[in-house]
Amino acid sequence: MIIQQGAVTASARIGDLGTVLGVSAPGIAAQARAGQFVHVRPGTSFEPLLRRPYSFNRIRRQEGEIELIVRPLGPGGEWIASRRPGDLLDLLGPLGTAFVIHRSARNLLLVAGGTGIAPMRVLAEQEASRRNVTLLMGGRSVAYLWPSDRLPPSVEYVTTTEDGSFGIGGRVTEALPELLRWADQLCACGPWPMLAAIGRMREEAERAPAAPGRAALLEAQIAVEQHMGCAMGVCRACVVVTSQGNARVCREGPVFPLGDVAFAEGEPATVGLVS
Ligand SMILES: Cc1cc2nc3c(=O)[nH]c(=O)nc-3n(C[C@H](O)[C@H](O)[C@H](O)COP(=O)(O)OP(=O)(O)OC[C@H]3O[C@@H](n4cnc5c(N)ncnc54)[C@H](O)[C@@H]3O)c2cc1C
Ligand code: FES
């Protein structure tokens, strides 16, 4: 984990989802893995004081670049999303745990809601040449979907919108059962209600007999988001309840086995966009 002044190389608005920032940060790019995040200083003064966490949306090791997708939400998010090429960003990272893709997985299913697309895009780019990858993404409307031209062409991209403006009408959880039958590994990131709904599907699968996709659901990995202070494991601001007790999202997470997270204990933070 290092502190690095990253130079913004590109900035592009992605519909209503947020702003993608390309940042030159070779030291961080060299170590970063899908699911991990950087803690970004949201200004040049002491207001706002605390850094804000953002997942890697792209890791370009050879070019020494990372990309982040930033919702212009709240004082920190607004300042970070408004950076332009040439501006510097003070970054601390990479932090947290990463997704682990099994070598034996042939059919990898990725599920994203809102800015939960960030680590799913990293996985799609990392795994597209190694196995079959399907990305299922949900948004309120077409304006909240990730653009298909920013995905590897071999990735099968399935989308849902709540208003039916694009793809399948409804939520990702309605399209998931069908795709799950094909999958032998599942990874997801998105708003807490979306992850909780997948958690309920997992509980039902635990009680059900063996069926295609059941193992992928039982062993699914998810990345969760929570308010953070230090992101160094010290302040305990980021705790969520798991089957092993309280866990710090910045240290034991943000990637957890789906079956470990105690969704019934309540929503830790409202993140992403409700899909
Ligand atoms: C591991 C991790 C990865 C994240 N990745 C991304 C990402 O890729 N893109 C992105 O846009 N956002 C991401 N977030 C959320 C992002 O950090 C917050 O939206 C940001 O800190 C908001 O700060 P603010 O000062 O702009 O807003 P505030 O004024 O502090 O809050 C604005 C809104 O964001 C919520 N919020 C604040 N902090 C967090 C937090 N840490 N987690 C969740 N919700 C929060 C508040 O409840 C409020 O609704 C991530 C959070 C974590 C923990
Ligand atoms: S943010 Fe301080 S312990 Fe996780």
Image (cartoon, rainbow, N blue to C red):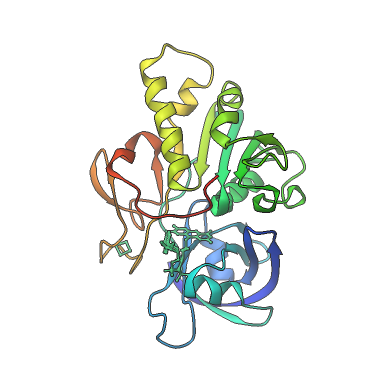
Q: Quadrant of ligand 2?
A: bottom left
Residue visible at 72% across and 51% down in the picture: 147
Dividing the image into 4 quarters, which one contains the N terminus? bottom left
Query: At 33% across and 68% down in the image, what residue appears?
Result: 229
Figure label count: 0
Tell me: residue 227, above or below residue 163: below
**Where is residue 7 drawn, in percent x and y?**
62, 78
Which residue, as the protein is rendered here, is positioned at the far bottom? Answer: 45
Is residue 122 shown above or below 70?
A: above
Residue drawn at (41%, 33%) of the image: 199
Q: Position of residue 216 (x, y in %)?
A: 49, 27
Task: Give the camera-side residue of 78 and 86.
Answer: 78
Residue 94 x, y percent position in the rendering: 47, 63
Side (left or right) of 60 relative to 173: right
Q: Is residue 35 visible?
A: yes
**Residue located 36% across and 64% down the image:** 228
Q: Quadrant of the C terminus?
A: top right
Depth check: give the residue in front, 64 or 54.
54
Percent x, y for residue 194?
A: 48, 41
Q: Is residue 261 visible?
A: no
Of all residues, the one furthest to the left in this rendering is: 245
Q: Looking at this rendering, what residue extends furthest in the top direction? A: 209
Kindly indicate the quadrant of the structure image that contains residue 9. bottom right
